[in-house]
Amino acid sequence: RKEVEQDPGPFNVPEGATVAFNCTYSNSASQSFFWYRQDCRKEPKLLMSVYSSGNEDGRFTAQLNRASQYISLLIRDSKLSDSATYLCVVSPGAGSYQLTFGKGTKLSVIP
Amino acid sequence: DAMVIQNPRYQVTQFGKPVTLSCSQTLNHNVMYWYQQKSSQAPKLLFHYYDKDFNNEADTPDNFQSRRPNTSFCFLDIRSPGLGDAAMYLCATSTNVGVWEETQYFGPGTRLLVL
């Protein structure tokens, strides 16, 4: 089983749609979870951290289910500028500096 | 603005010709990382420095070396590039302060082409 697994997509959605990405991780001891966004031929940029209680930042909502080792990202009211690859990232935490990246899910928002 | 800077942004080298990629940061972070990312793949950690302590990933080829002469700068040396080393090389930094210790800040990357 891959350490961090994501549906590669692509997800092609119309503007204004709601889209959800899922991610599973294999290391049950993982402590920290993130979503990064990566535009084509650019560097990854932190979109949001994922907390146990779930968290929201504007149109973006992240959820964590530790029992199922599952993380999700929901994007509401999709904009053209949301088109990018979304990387699920997991860390053992507790002072570890290792991040394990998923391969990413590609999103294309269509006019 | 505080940032992570990588030079050059694009590097073309010949098969077997040594190449050095550079990274500098104004964030004063004590941890610096080098990743390799190939097309449609996840970034793969090559090594990282915690201050001056070098930490090599077990599967990083010996062909890849790194130097960190001071807090701000870190270099990636590829001693004998092969065609399979063509990739985007990403430098990242993080700090071990508080709850954000795992958050990594990436430079724009250097895209390496090996002819």
Image: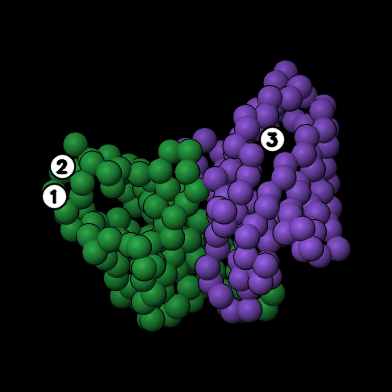
Kindly indicate the quadrant of the structure image that contains residue A100: bottom right
* Colour of the chain lettered B: green
Which chain is disc 1 placed on? B
Amino acid found under the numbered disc labelled 3: Asp
Task: Give the alpha-carbon distance from disc 1 to disc 3, as whole Å.
Answer: 40 Å
Residue drawn where x is 42% and y is 69% of the image = B48
Amino acid found under the numbered disc labelled 2: Gln
Residue receiving disc 3: A82
Colour purple maps to chain: A
Query: Is label 3 on the same chain as label 2?
Result: no
Q: Position of residue B110 (x, y in %)?
A: 37, 47
Residue drawn where x is 28% and y is 47% of the image = B85
Residue drawn where x is 29% and y is 70% of the image = B67
A42 above or below A108? Answer: below
Q: For this view, does B81 lie left or right of residue B44? A: left
Assess disc 2: are there few (<14), some (14-19) or many (≥20) residues with their C-alpha within 10 Å of its C-alpha: some
Residue receiving disc 1: B17
SS class of the residue under badge 3? helix
B100 above or below A15? Answer: below
A34 above or below A10? Answer: below
B68 or A89: nearer the viewer: A89
Q: Quadrant of the C terminus of chain A?
A: top right
Q: Position of residue A21 (x, y in %)?
A: 72, 41
Query: Is label 1 on the same chain as label 2?
Result: yes
